[in-house]
Amino acid sequence: MDSSLTSLKKQMQETTDHFKQELAKIRTGRANPQMLQGVMVDVYGQQTPLEHAATVNAVDAQLLQITPYDPNNLDTISAVIRDDQSLGLNPSDDGKVVRVPIPALTTERREQIVKQVGEKIEKAKVSLRNARHDALDEAKTAKNDGDISEDEYHRFEKQVGELLSGTQDEIEQLAETKEQEIMTV
């Protein structure tokens, strides 16, 4: 059962790491290069992540600057960012770099973003519960096959519950910190 517990810890850590990455992509009113993570740009007929086609820097709290490795991709990068409705950004370029001003968030927009955080929390929790369910099913099968005793099964069940609780607490703490960051004007 130790291997199952180790595997479960790994799955839960992966879920937590993914949740952190998702939170990093959410706008908080401050410029952050990770906001553009996941943006795909058509470079030489191939869909490429933006970070592979250009450098993205936060010049100040309200401005991102994107410097393409190939200046021919400047218009494509601007268009992709402008057309992505989930970002809600309006980039401009001067022929060398793309500047993306980050507008201040309205209270209404902040509340919408907090709802997005809530949706991401729920997805993370579902993933954690599925991992717990799989681990317990595996342990139950081992118990029914006689590979482990009833006591070992209950001990494993308790360890899984504690692990799930601790990971959920960590995710909720991360989300709470992000929500405070979003709501801070």
Image: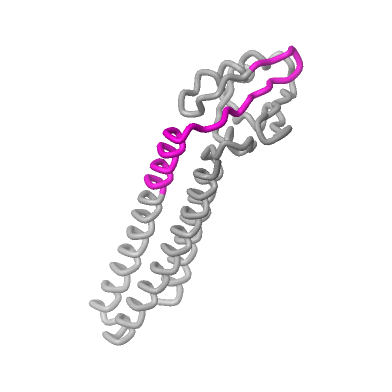
Picture residue at 50% right of the left edge, 18% below the top: 83
Q: Position of residue 108 (x, y in %)?
A: 42, 33
Report the quarter where the C terminus lies.
top right
Residue located at (25% from left, 77% from top): 145
Quarter occupied by the N terminus: bottom left
> Is 185 positioned to the left or the right of 140 in the image?
right
Q: Quadrant of residue 57?
A: top right
Residue 84 lies left or right of residue 164; in this view the side is: right
Where does the image place residue 173, in percent across and percent down from the top left?
48, 60
Camera sees residue 18: no
Depth order, front residue of 154/45:
154
The residue lying at 54 percent from left, 19 percent from top is 82
Residue 97 higher or lower than 31, as above or below: above
Give the residues drawn in magenta, as a range.
Answer: 92-120
Residue drawn at point x = 56 percent, y = 44 percent? 24
Q: Quadrant of residue 5?
A: bottom left
Task: Please tell me which residue lies in front, 119 or 124.
Answer: 119
Q: How far across and how far down the image is residue 105, in percent?
A: 52, 33
Does residue 65 appear left or right of residue 141 in this picture?
right
Q: Closer to the camera, 100 or 78?
A: 100
The reply to whether the magenta stretch includes residue 93 is yes
